[in-house]
Amino acid sequence: MSNRDQRWHGALTLTLLAAGCAALVAGVYSVAEPRLADNLEKERMARYAAVLRGTRYDTIAKQALRIDDDAGTDSARAAVRVYGVFDRGELTAMLIETTSVGYAGAIDLVVGVDRELSVLGVRVLRHRETPGIGDFIDAQRTDWIRQFEQQSIDTGAYQTWRLTSDGGRFDAVSGATVTARAVVRGVRDALTLLAQSAARPTLSTAERADDD
Amino acid sequence: MMTRDLWRRGVWSENPATVQLLGLCPLLAVTTKTTYAIGLGIATLIIVTLSNIVVASLRRFLSAAIRIPAYVLIIASLVTSIETIMAAFFPSLYAGLGIFVALIVTNCLIVARAEAFARHNTVSAAAIDGLATGTGFLLAIVAVGMLREAVGSLTLFADFALLFGGDGTTALSGGGLRLALLPPGAFLALAAVIVATRWLSARQQRHPTTERGE
């Protein structure tokens, strides 16, 4: 074979291999997809139940509650979705889904709060922090995430919503300050936004947004 | 004979972690608990075996110029597929192991076995080599993990339920030498394991008991 033939031969082999690999990954994914969606949904429901522990409820609204346009900045509003939690038609709590940026990308959080915006619980829905270092934020790994329970942003406490190493009240974790800081910031900003929202008094009437 | 040789090399005389010093990045990073070490070790074992099999069966087509990109393609697709299958069908195992699987894409140990062995050996030999090397890596990483966890947290196999189901969590006792859990502790623990294995093989050579390889 001449040099040129060899080159064409190599290019062709790689192309075929790439196509084969793509087919493998796509095939596996299409077989697994329904199960994946199912698992995610189950896990999400389990996390919701964990952050609403101690609250009576029978329904979690599918549609997000409206946040007032004059609360926070546009980007802050875009990062937060609030869902009403109801017991026989009466609002008993709210679920906040928000995203914060950690050491290795987005950390998706869900925060359960009661009607006074006091935190019932926080859980991480999804993260890519370093295993063994940044994954202490998972409730299965450590109890770190539980220190948010019963905390609230009211009564001028905003300044203390920081890590101990930054002069606040939440435990820092050595070697993973960025991760810990991101979670504290995410929860704090979501609560602040909700507290600022003039819609807050009307939440009890379960006003729903027109669209998500 | 051939098989036995492959096992001896993979697990002992050419152990990927303690002798060839391959794949150290994940080995150093996740060994704060034995459970994590087992997780990464098992995931590596599976991937290196599969990658060896695929590379060996395609060896006729992989010319020198395209070998390395081909390995990258094969390994990345295998890792992605395994990760997807685990996430879909073994969600509880995935919750514990899943994130380690993604880490393996960059493990040079896998490429090393593809390049050094699988590309000029038969499929069955490559499969055995993958199993042996993977087992060697698993043993080494578990040794480092046990040492670090025992010294650092005074526990062993904490959070074992993360890997194999159940919901028992073990709180850290809080005692122990924290140095072992910090990054320098990883190097010290690995060094200790290497010293121990070298000492054992030196002693073996001074007092040859059974038949000698090589």
Image (spheres, grey):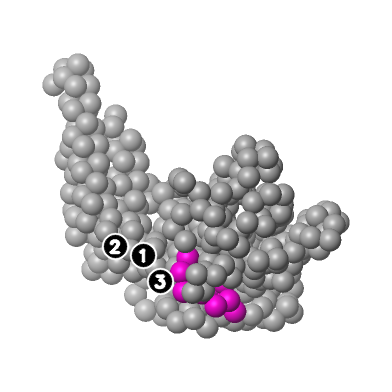
Q: Are marks 1 and 3 in contact (CB under 8 Å)?
A: no
Q: Is residue A205 found inside the magenta-colored segment of the image?
A: no
Which chain does the numbered disc 3 sit on? B
Residue B86 left/right relative to A178? left
Query: Contact (CB < 8 A) between labels 2 and 1?
Result: yes
Q: Nearer the viewer, residue A67 or B153?
A: A67
In the picture, the disc for residue A39 is 1
User: Comparing marks 2 and 3, which lies closer to the viewer?
Assistant: 2
**Could you tell me which residue is drawn at 21 percent across and 17 percent down?**
A3
Q: Are marks 2 and 3 in contact (CB under 8 Å)?
A: no
| Nearer-the-camera pick, A122 or A67 | A67
Percent x, y of residue B66? 28, 32
Residue found 63% across the figure and 40% down from its top: A69
Q: Is residue A168 above or below residue B74?
A: below
Give the residue type at disc 2. Arg
Alpha carbon distance from label 1 to label 3? 10 Å
